[in-house]
Amino acid sequence: MASLRDIKNRITSTKKTSQITKAMQMVSAAKMNKAEMNARSFVPYMEKIQEVTASIALGSKDVSHPMLTSRPVKKTGYLVITSDRGLAGAYNSNVLRNVYQTIQKRHKSPDEYAIIAVGRVGRDFFKKRNMNVILDIVAVADQPAFAEIKDIASKTVGMFADETFDELYMYYSHYVSAIQQDVTEKKLLPLTDISSSTKLTSYEFEPSAEEILKVLLPQYAESLIYGALLDSKASEHAARMTAMQNATDNAKELINSLSLSYNRARQAAITQEITEIVGGAAALE
């Protein structure tokens, strides 16, 4: 049985740990609220740019663009969004497991796929397994601005245009609520399934629909990446908040259990001392 000093030291260290996890929970809660607001405020822009893009692409019969056209698939690209840090429950592992199993199922050789990793956890995961990571970005801000990720978004779209890969899938954690985040697979390029939930609008073009699409389609694809990143950040903070809350609750349960053990051990020690005193007094008589 552990001594009173050992139990007391464990109680002290567990209390300090619970203070840390409680503080991390509060920080993550504040970041989650801001990230959720950013993700939701970006939705109207995405809906409008999708409506305009769909109206131009589908409303003009003679319009063509490489980003709208499927081609024979020689190599598949995977854009995977994870975090730079752990302590977020199953947030990273769920996304990485899904991507890893998909790649193992679809491809027999590293030459058949290419990975673009956003986040240090995902980058390290793939590199440790000698998987084909062609581009990575780390240290993305908790509340990222579009300017911060425009470089990787434009490079990703440019790789498709340069035929580095012939199709691109995006994997990230979709924010549903503070307690639910779903792993999402979205085919990003080519934009063959572009559609609008609203009625297509008729536009007059100047200079032409094709010239407009040359500018609009890359911006639309980049916006999809940015929107997924905002969504993923909200999921990350929510997952970390939940994980830290669970850790704090577990620490409290452990403290209660250790306190009960400490009191029992202390009572047993006092009882033993009293017995020894009584026994000594009886011996003197």
Image: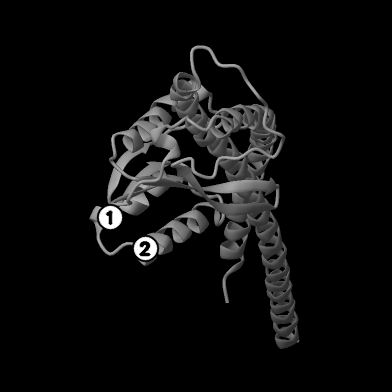
Q: What amino acid type should be assigned to the residue bearing mark 1?
A: Glu
Mark 1 sits on what residue? 112
Front residue of this view, candidates 237 and 218: 218
Color encoding of the figure: one colour
Q: Name the residue at 66% across, 60% down.
A: 250
Percent x, y for residue 199? 71, 34
Left or right: where 184 falls relative to 160? right
Left or right: where 165 falls relative to 61? left
Front residue of this view, candidates 135 and 141: 135
Percent x, y for residue 225? 50, 36
Q: Name the residue at 55% across, 32% down.
A: 142
Percent x, y for residue 96? 45, 56
Q: Is residue 172 visible?
A: yes
Q: Name the residue at 50% across, 24% down.
A: 216
Q: Secondary structure at mark 1?
A: helix
Q: Is residue 20 visible?
A: no
Can you tell which quarter of the image residue 249 is in? bottom right
Neighbor class of circle 1 (other Cα within 10 Å; few <14, some 14-19, many 20+) is: some
Q: Is residue 60 above or below residue 280?
A: above
Whichever of labels 2 and 1 marks the residue nearer the N terminus, that label is 2
Q: Is residue 29 above or below residue 108?
A: above
Label 2 close to label 1 by CB (< 8 Å): yes
Q: What residue occupies the far top of the structure in this picture?
A: 206
Which label belongs to residue 106?
2
Left or right: where 187 falls relative to 24? left
